[in-house]
Image (tube, rainbow, N blue to C red):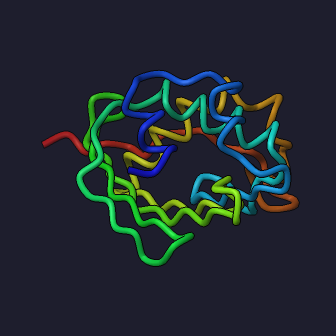
Amino acid sequence: MHPLRALRERGHNTPEQVAALLAEDVVFHSPIFVRGIEGKDAVAKVFAASSGARSGVYAREVKLDPRTTFLHWKGEVGGRAIESFELIVDDANGLIVDRTVAFRPFPATAIFRSAVYPVLKDVVPADVWAYEGLPVSTELPMERAH
């Protein structure tokens, strides 16, 4: 079991707990940001905020090679189903150097982004939340009434 999965399965994580698993030059790629988050301190805070904003379980883990792990996670955010697919790359010391995550469906991804924004807006710069020249938006997609 990958150490990040083991930590997340124990419940809400602190930035300090997450930081112990990260290389100094770690990069995190997520669809809620327009570019990667770089550096152990910022990435640890993002990972910790994420674990407190959603709940669920890992459905699958596959070791692709000695340093690369695929994880499939299913859960809920804001009462809606969400799932993620991620690749984690570790260095020779077993510390995470790169993590790339994809979420689905889009409306749940938007709910997740809105949930973590208040916690991370002072950690993650505005130019990571939105493209240059565009305002940061945390509006949720509209639900149709049937």
- Say above or below: 140 vs 27: above
Compare residues 47 and 32 and report the one nearer the observer.
Answer: 47
Q: Residue at x 38, y 59 (%)?
A: 71
Q: Is residue 130 left or right of residue 32?
A: right
- Say above or below: 126 vs 123: below
- Say above or below: 129 vs 79: below
Q: Residue at x 85, y 43 (%)?
A: 125
Quadrant housing residue 111:
top left
Q: Is residue 107 left or right of residue 110?
A: left
Q: Residue at x 69, y 35 (%)?
A: 20
Rendered location of residue 140, percent (x, y): 47, 40
Q: Quadrant of the C terminus?
A: top left
Quadrant housing residue 55:
top left
Q: How many marks?
A: 0
Compare residues 74 and 4 and report the one nearer the observer.
Answer: 4
Q: Residue furthest bottom?
A: 65
Rendered location of residue 67, percent (x, y): 56, 70
Compare residues 83 and 135 and report the one nearer the observer.
Answer: 83
Rendered location of residue 98, percent (x, y): 67, 63
Rendered location of residue 48, percent (x, y): 60, 30
Q: Residue furthest left?
A: 146
